Amino acid sequence: MFTGLIREMAKVESFVGSLLTIKASYKPKIGDSIAINGACLTVVKLNNNSFSVELSPESKSVLALENYKNGVHIEPAMMMGDRFEGHIVQGHVDCIGKIVAVKNNGNSADFFIELPSEYIKFVIQKGSVTVDGVSLTVNEVIQNKNQFRLTIIPHTINNTLFKTYKINSKVNIETDMFARYVYNIFAPKGKNMSWEDVDKIMASY
């Protein structure tokens, strides 16, 4: 379990085959879980100033691998008793999103991200979403375009991969865990539901 608060901007030392080697100040142990750009991976090797994780074919098929070079976000798994901030993140990437627009607002910037149509229903206005491991608040959902809007402050831009994102950049997306669970509990099999439908069902109890 993670919070979506980045511990460190680490550096990719190498990515050969299934083995990704990261140079970082953080020192994990063999078997530790660590989120790298939002994907929960297991430490399988330790070196002097780096550690390695292994990516399965399944992981490689759902991740924006072009972001696993140069700098990456890392966050160790939470430990019992840790201060809880951000939001509950599993480190299970749902899909790859695409940056379709960036609009500067003076003291912030709006990033518009497009998702595959089957995932936009799990993104809720003022709910949470994780982008390459960064916990963020959704400001707007544009259903007819399968897009959502994030407003990012300069501190976040300057200290994360957001400063490198351009139009058509791909990013790892983990939607809100509770949105997925609630939707799957209430949605009849084979039938699409809106959040208005879910609200009506919950109001009837």
Image (tube, rainbow, N blue to C red):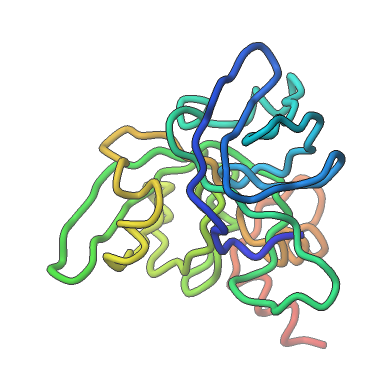
Numbered disc total: 0
In this view, which residue lies farthest toward the top?
17
Which is more toward the observer, 120 or 112?
112
Which is more toward the observer, 31 or 96?
31
In this view, which residue lies farthest toward the front?
48
Describe residue 94's horizontal placement relative to residue 14 as left or right: right
Give the percent coordinates (x, y) of residue 146.
Answer: 43, 47
Give the percent coordinates (x, y) of residue 150.
Answer: 37, 62
Q: Residue 153, relative to residue 119: is it above or below?
A: below
Q: Quadrant of residue 45?
A: top right
Give the percent coordinates (x, y) of residue 50.
Answer: 64, 34
Describe residue 197's horizontal placement relative to residue 72 as left or right: right
Q: Quadrant of the C terminus?
A: bottom right
For image coordinates 75% across by 57% down, the residue present is 77
Q: Residue 198, relative to residue 93: is it above or below?
A: below
Q: Residue 171, relative to residue 158: is it above or below?
A: above
Q: Quadrant of residue 169?
A: top left
Which is more toward the observer, 93 or 86?
86
Q: Quadrant of residue 49?
A: top right
Q: Quadrant of the N terminus?
A: bottom right
Give the percent coordinates (x, y) of residue 192.
Answer: 66, 52
For image coordinates 71% across by 46% down, the residue present is 92
For image coordinates 54% across by 41% down, the residue present is 172
Describe residue 141's horizontal placement relative to residue 4 as left or right: left
In this view, which residue lies farthest toward the left?
106
For image coordinates 25% across by 46% down, the residue present is 101
